[in-house]
Image (spheres, helix red, strand yellow):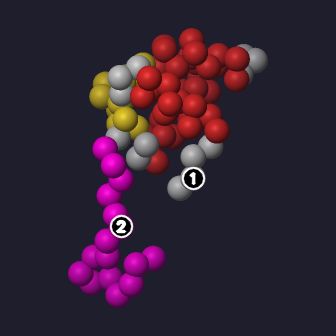
Amino acid sequence: MKLTPKQAAILRECKNLGGTITRKEAVTRFRRWHYANADKYIGELLSGMVDAGFLTRVKTGTYKLAKAGRAATAESNQTELF
């Protein structure tokens, strides 16, 4: 999956902060993206990045960079990949 510009910016900031970012840090840094309810929308973006495998949720409101992606593999009863 290709990163959106906002996701790429969050990953860069996470790397700059040592591999871990909190929701509060992300909202403070990227509040300008949203006129209102920045906390909600940036939180949804972070959760989506967890679902996509870019970040790992350490605890509520704290995220770290995910380890390198795993290669997709076929199950033993699956005849082809996708």
Q: Nearer the viewer, residue 44 or 28?
A: 28
Dividing the picture into quarters, in which one does residue 61 lie? Answer: top left
Provide the residue designation for mark 2. 72
Image coordinates of residue 52 in percent, x first then y, are: 46, 48
Element assignment for label 1: loop
Q: Residue furthest bottom?
A: 79
Q: Residue 45 at what x, y percent from top left?
A: 56, 34
Please give the residue where the numbered disc 1 appears in the rendered image.
2
Q: Residue furthest front?
A: 16
Tell me the amino acid under the disc marked 1. Lys
Do we see residue 61 in this rendering?
Answer: no
Crowding near pointer 2: few (<14 within 10 Å), some, many (20+)? Answer: few
Position in image of residue 6 (x %, y %): 62, 34
Left or right: 35 with respect to 64? Answer: right
Q: Are marks 1 and 2 in contact (CB under 8 Å)?
A: no
In this rendering, would 36 be left or right of 19?
right
Q: Which residues are magenta?
A: 67-82
Membership of 70 in magenta stretch: yes
Q: Report the residue at 62% width, 27% height from top.
A: 41
Q: Residue at x 33, y 49 (%)?
A: 68
Most prominent secondary structure in the magenta stretch? loop
Viewer-side residue, 60 vs 6: 6
**Count of numbered labels shown in the rendering:** 2
Q: Amino acid at mark 2?
A: Ala
Label 2: element kind = loop
Q: Is residue 71 magenta?
A: yes
